Amino acid sequence: MNLRPCRVEISTRALADNYRFLSNLAGSAAEVLAMVKADAYGHSLALCAPAAVRAGARWLGVTSVEEALQARSLCPDARVLVMTGCFPGEGAAALRHNLTPVAWDQWQLDELEGAARSAGLGAGSVAVHLEIDSGMSRQGVAPEDLGPILARFGAETPLRLEGVLTHLYAADESDGLTDHAQLARLDEALARIAAAGLKPNWLSAGASATLLSGGLAQVADIAAKRGMKAMIRPGLALYGVAPQFVPDEPAAVTEARKGLKPVLSWKAQVASVRSVPVGAAVGYNGTFVATEPMRLALLPVGYADGLDRRLGNRSSLLVRGQRAPLVGRVSMDLAVIDVTEIDGVEPGDEVVILGAQGAETITADEHAGATGTIPWEVFTRIGARVPRLPL
Ligand SMILES: *Cc1c(COP(=O)(O)O)cnc(C)c1O
């Protein structure tokens, strides 16, 4: 039981609507994997993964085997793609629970092959998705280094090359030049894979930005040319938020943005209200000093809950449908808002940290803008102690 009034509400209906919207946007061009890594971007895997599956998702994307096991217990029939693959000792669990690991290094294939042989699995029974480094220099194998990796997928090994993926690292740049260069590198990798006599089924590239901007068409073309099925992996858009594009937003994104519904609301309640005289210091180090006689409301939420400390004196929350500035420093477990201009605020009043109240909305983009980060980080920073409740 959690009675401290600080909670996140999740609309699984909005999430399902977003999945169907994205799926329609992809049309017949691609399978839409629902990215639910990092506890569904802080939205709760337990609530979101089953909702995505009910809305039609056949594939879920998670970071680790640990997350994948949780996804597996929630969604027994979904394919679960493990984006950062299996670490030493995790192969057996991955196989036992029918997870689909991404791999790009020899040691990852050693782990899987060893586990498969110990389990007595036959040739080609373990599906692996191979990551290509098409330019991000993060994970993946460069096209020219594929030889020794492809040699691991011989006829007698339990490993089967089921998919090929890459990550587009500048899909939010509206000129599309980096995508173009990366997809050319990806195609080079596919030529080598075909030359090695391997026929993977899936070609997976692109995230929210690619899907919303219409960039999927290029991925689908390459897949079709190689006789593969395209797969796209949106995360942020599934939670109702479109990435910001630079230098300007393509018209397709502006249009698609309208179809997305926010899934998460973060709420607290006023704990107490006090009046302070002009000159009163507020919070640690008195970084805010009352400029007039003021009314302040105390909230049971702090940076330990994921309310960024840098939002103090820089942002507002909603109470009684109006914006109330966060004043002074955000403490670990508490924050203070200025309600001088808002009539009748009292203990128990609902405060919206992220989400809508009345005609006003506070978005993850707004918090991200005030703290120099991105909405992905705002969501994933909401603390584990804040309960996620279905709406
Ligand atoms: C997180 C992630 C995605 C989803 O990205 P969004 O921008 O949130 O849609 C897709 N692919 C990979 C490899 C990722 O790590």
Image (spheres, rainbow, N blue to C red):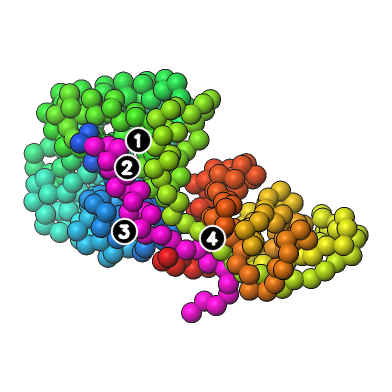
Numbered label attached to residue 10: none
Which quadrant is the C terminus positioned in? bottom left
Query: How far apart in space, not on screen, are marks 4 and 2 (Cα)?
Result: 24 Å
Residue 7 in sight in this render:
yes
Query: How far apart in space, not on screen, are marks 3 and 1 (Cα)?
Result: 20 Å
- Mark 3 belongs to which amino acid? Ala
Q: State whether label 1 is within 8 Å of ligand 1.
A: yes
Residue 310 in sight in this render:
no
Q: Which residue, given by chain and number where applicable, does mark 1 sit on?
A: 211
- Mark 1 belongs to which amino acid? Leu
Q: Position of residue 215 (x, y in %)?
A: 34, 28
Query: Which segment is the magenta one?
Result: 1-27
Q: Marks 3 and 2: CB-CB under 8 Å?
A: no
- Looking at the image, residue 129 lies above or below residue 178: below
Q: Secondary structure at mark 3?
A: helix
Q: Which sits in the foreground, 265 or 46?
A: 265
Q: Marks 1 and 2: CB-CB under 8 Å?
A: yes
Where residue 67 sits, quadrant-wise, is: bottom left
- Name which of mark 4 and mark 3 comes first in the sequence: 3
Query: How far apart in space, not on screen, are marks 3 and 2 (Cα)?
Result: 14 Å
Query: How far apart in space, not on screen, are marks 1 and 2 (Cα)?
Result: 8 Å
Where residue 213 sits, quadrant-wise, is: top left
Q: Which residue, given by chain and number where applicable, does mark 4 sit on?
A: 266
Which residue sits at x=29%, y=47%? 20
- Mark 2 belongs to which amino acid? Leu
